[in-house]
Amino acid sequence: METTHGRISAQARRHFLAGDLIERGFDNDEIVDITGASLTSVKRWRTKIQSEGLAGLARQPQSGRPVKLDAIYKAELKTILEGGAIAAGYLSDRWTTKIVADLISKSGYPVYSS
């Protein structure tokens, strides 16, 4: 199964497997055993299917302002990230969201559309 971004994730496959099992009448404990998901997740998925159908398990688009990074800057950023944080001038070679945000803000590139 493919998406616009490539292959479907393992998480999505597990959601839809659980959805299929729910629709086929399996009980929650059986679905937990088969999928390895938590009972809480299975209950949440069951409720979602009852209200929205199997499509309710599909990943929803995230809210927030759209990112305005163009393909060239994304490629540059990827190269910097692959080179490591120390090579980019940071004290640790571990990338964190705070460090990546700092890197982007120092670039002067407009990140968000207006």
Image (cartoon, helix red, strand yellow):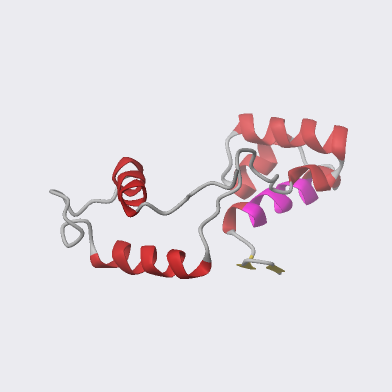
Residue 23 in which image quadrant: top right
Q: Who's the residue at 64% across and 42% down the image?
A: 62
**Frontmost residue, 82 versus 21:** 82
Magenta portion: prevailing SS class: helix
Counting from the top left corner in percent of width and height, residue 96 is at: 31, 45
Q: Quadrant of the C terminus?
A: top right
Q: Who's the residue at 71% across and 47% down the image?
A: 18
- 100 w.r.t. 5: above or below: above
Q: Who's the residue at 65% across and 53% down the image?
A: 12
- 4 w.r.t. 10: above or below: below
Q: Is residue 68 magenta?
A: no
- 62 w.r.t. 93: above or below: above
Q: Quadrant of the N terminus?
A: bottom right
Locate residue 62 relative to residue 26 in the image: left or right. left
**Frontmost residue, 44 versus 104:** 104
Locate residue 69 relative to residue 100 in the image: left or right. right
**Frontmost residue, 35 versus 93:** 93
Locate residue 25 relative to residue 114 in the image: left or right. right
Counting from the top left corner in percent of width and height, residue 79 is at: 33, 69
Counting from the top left corner in percent of width and height, residue 102 is at: 31, 44
**Frontmost residue, 47 versus 61:** 61
Q: Who's the residue at 58% across and 47% down the image?
A: 113
Locate residue 26 relative to residue 67 in the image: left or right. right
The mark tally for this picture is 0
Q: Which region of the structure is painted magenta?
A: 12-21
Q: Is residue 20 magenta?
A: yes
